[in-house]
Amino acid sequence: MSGYDVIGTEAPRIDAPDKATGRALFIDDMTMPGMLYGALLQSPLAHARIRGIDTSAAKQLPGVKSVVTWEDAGLVKYGVSPARYDETIFCHDKVRHVGDNVAAVAAVDLETALEAVSLIKVDYEDLPAVFTIEQAMAEGAPLVHDIYPRNISAEVHNEFGDVEAAFKECDLIKMTSLVNKRQDCAFIEPQGCIAYYDHSGTLTLYSSTQVPHYTQRSVAMVLGMPIGKVRVVKPYVGGGFGAKASANHMELAACLMSMKTGKPVKMNFEREQVFYHGRSRHQFFHTMTTGVKRDGTILALKHECYMNGGAYSSFGIATVYYAGSLLGGPYKMPNMKYDGYRIATNLPACGAQRGHGGVIARGCWEQQLDMIAEELGMDPVELRLKNIMTAGDITCNDLNMSSLGMKECIEAVRDASEWKNKKGKLPRGKGIGMACGFFVSGAGYPIYRSDTFHGTVVIKLTEDGGTALVYTASAEIGQGSDTAFAMIAAEALGIPLEMVRLESGDTDFGVDLGAYSSRQTLMTGHATKEAAEDVKRQVLEVLSKELNVPMEDMDIKKGLIVFKKEKPDFSGLRTRYIKEHRGWVDNPGAEDELSFREASRIAYLARGSIVGTGKYKPPELGGKFKGAAVGTSPAYGCSAQIVELTVDEGTGRIIIDKMVDAHDCGRAINRTSVEGQMQGSLSMGMGEALFEEVKFDARGRILNADLAEYKIPSALDMPPTEVIVVESNEPNGPFGAKEVGEGNIMATIPAILNAVYDAVGVRIYELPLNPERVHKALKEYKQKNKI
Amino acid sequence: MKRIIQLTINDKEYEVAVEPNQTLTDMLRYELGLTGTKKGCEVGDCGSCTVIMDGIPVNSCLVLAMQANGRKITTIEGLETEKGMHPIQKAFVEKGAIQCGFCTPGMILSSKSLLDKNPNPTEEEIRAGISGNLCRCTGYQKIVDAVKSVGK
Ligand code: FES
Ligand code: FES
């Protein structure tokens, strides 16, 4: 057994009862006295010069309290990466995509605000627009931003080893491609916020965000305020998956209008605006060439990628790096060359989405590995087992696999799905496929260049001694981080989970970079553990003095003080405690062990409030080459999946019959949450593989900006899933824990692609695998093979 | 012009002045403070606004408040009693069927309507019963498990 009391259990989430009863407050559930309602004016055109903006009619409408444009907001540029700050709150010279932000209104109610928005007159001069990579990179194409020649907003070129030389050693060289479609994170709660600038000059922004810290910095920078005067608070958030991982225009506009009016301003995206804000998965065009030896040893990968990025950089510079670097593992591969380009177009900006940058690359490569296995006459499972890395291996691009249960994951899914009896042996139309993937446990570096800690945590014992209050600025957005940190605090302090109370998501609690890159369990978890240990030490110090027992001879477990050697006489302490609690019914009995509550009350009486602090920053990671930072992480999670499906050859429709997924998450802090992350990943990956696609018309307008036409998986689309938690002990993780939130999605698309091939013998290089595409591929296949 | 409607919500009688174009969702949330009913799309696609009206689960964003005149409505707030959470709520908590929780109220109410009619649903029936409620977080497996556990 692990020897742990709290972690590794299936404890119910601490926020679940409030969520089950409708009490949990999300942003739109909040109101403030005197609150105004805001609305945005967004561009109907994809690319146009702004010749003038006339707000006079809007301003005159009764009930309107504020109308703002770039003239009020200023033109401070912001974005995600400081190297690519290319957005302003409002456009001033031109609009760059349909839905680009031109003005905002705050009024006494939403109807008035919307009416005022409709009264703002913008004089646009339509400009030629570019929507595809070909259009954007064509000679003489209009530029989305003057600062990006040929519309290349970021590019990466690196080579590890010598790919061309390695190819000469290879027995088989295979080239394939894969292209996906733009995805939408499609969380069920649209973004919303309330900004309130109070009389003390403090601006508080309540927002449905994944990243209170980065949002605080963006707001302060753009509006020219000291960071200390800006507080960002995250209520419960209805999912994020990447698109809520940076400040948005609506938040900034609400802040600006609250500062102008002195009133709280509430704003919400409608579902359509969620789509136009975008910031979800890019469209990727991957071409890969892999060289292997006859025995299946992978020697080299040459990889080229073009990404349609949309009108602003957002996370894109990181995305284009990740798309290359995340192929460094989990297979041993000495040579890798990557050329990646992110192209600006007049579409809404793409950003990060679950499995940031790596998902389509993984899809392309793992399908190719399947083809290579077949040509070599090897079982795809064997090909992978032959090449996998194990703990201690370092990739050619300097990613350190400090723990890696890749082998255990592959064997687990193989054995759970009767792979050997099924692969290649199912009746035509039915198929089985497998793939692997891996992902970072948190980015090794913050988005802005800094020596900042990535997470700080404060734990304060209530003065009565009965409760540990955990304060963290981390972001619970549904993944279960609050519960994980409460469990880590309880374990490290030696008290039951019920004695921990946790507050999170408030920049007043410290620094935490937030919920992205699967970082919180490892990083905030470390800081939580350190803070709990600090508290524990202080309590034991006081106890040591009072009882004359050396510190190292004591411990705290399950809320009781453990004396490792002889039990001292603590009746004096107990008497003091009971004297303070005359008339209370829950005082300890004479025979009881000394409790944590008594001990921490005594500690308070000796020292005042007991406060412990913790912090975490990864050690310096990665190589020295340009872009080495992206992809580095203190640890890597990995997964293997096997999918079984049925292809209806008449219609081209694919039905997923079963998914088996194994993931190495280090030590599972909360097993239920780990499984939940795995199951959620399977569903998002399945939707992306089979039907998710944001579609545009010829003028850059979204054709399906709603959840009916942009289809995400329903309960009927999802097959039964089996998830297998593979535990390793990650040396760099708190209690050995690492990521689970994103690594799982990596294997889903290629496992489906490979299962389709197993079912009907067709390779498809474009997603999603909707009935039309599959049907067409089948038809071509039959014509070619004269079936 | 506002009009007065009368209806029963969670076994309590209400008289509310509503605008002709106001949805039942907005009335519940903004007039009565019953914010457990969520709003994910406002056009009937996501199910997060599900309430039970006269025994039938409906997307309250597609119902005008006026149309609820004289009806009996159950919202998520109506499931908890002095004895504590409803067994379905408990099952959702215990089985890990809740992540972000934004779909949860609607999901629980759809599950309740299903179980009221069919106390022992099969997995297929459960999936069909909640197919109008989108969840982006859980992949549905634990939700299905939770509903199944109450059914037994
Ligand atoms: S809000 Fe009613 S169905 Fe989405
Ligand atoms: S739990 Fe997040 S949408 Fe269902």
Image: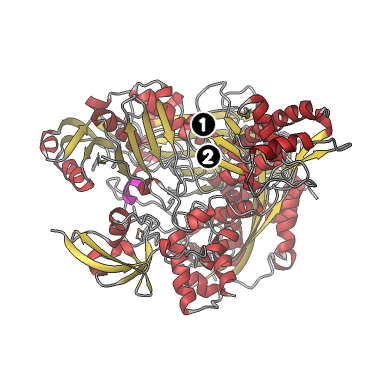
- Residue A647 position by quadrant: bottom right
The Cα–Cα distance between marks 1 and 2, rounded to whole angstroms, is 8 Å
10 Å crowding of disc 2: few (<14), some (14-19), many (20+) = some
In the displayed structure, does residue B68 sit left or right of residue A570?
A: left
Side (left or right) of A747 relative to A232: right
Q: Which mark is residue A509?
A: 1
Image point (41%, 50%), residue name: A189
Residue A400: within the magenta? no
Decide if ligand 2 comes within 8 Å of the CB at mark 1. no
Please indicate, yes or no, whether residue A273 appears anywhere in the rendered image: yes
Q: Residues within 10 Å of mark 1 (few under 14, many from 20)?
A: some
Question: At 57% from the left edge and 48% from the top edge, which residue is drawn?
Answer: A480
Residue closer to the observer: A96 or A243: A243
Q: Position of residue A548 (x, y in %)?
A: 82, 27
- With respect to residue A513, does B81 lie above or below? below
Task: Indicate whether A646 appears above or below A678.
Answer: below
Q: Residue furthest right?
A: A566
> Looking at the image, which is closer to me, A756 or A104?
A104
User: Would you say the residues marked 1 and 2 are in contact, meaning their CB atoms lie under 8 Å apart?
Assistant: yes
Please state the horizontal and vertical placement of residue A109, each as a whole percent of the image: 22, 45
Q: Position of residue A781 (x, y in %)?
A: 53, 64
Amino acid type for the residue under numbered disc 1: Phe
**Three-letter code for the amino acid on which mark 2 is drawn:** Glu
Q: Nearer the viewer, residue A582 or A328?
A: A582
- Between A50 and A452, the one lying in front of the other is A452
Stretch in magenta = A269-275
Q: Secondary structure at mark 1?
A: helix
Q: Which residue is mark 2?
A: A503
Prevailing secondary structure class for the magenta stretch in the rendered image: helix
Give the chain letter at badge 1.
Answer: A
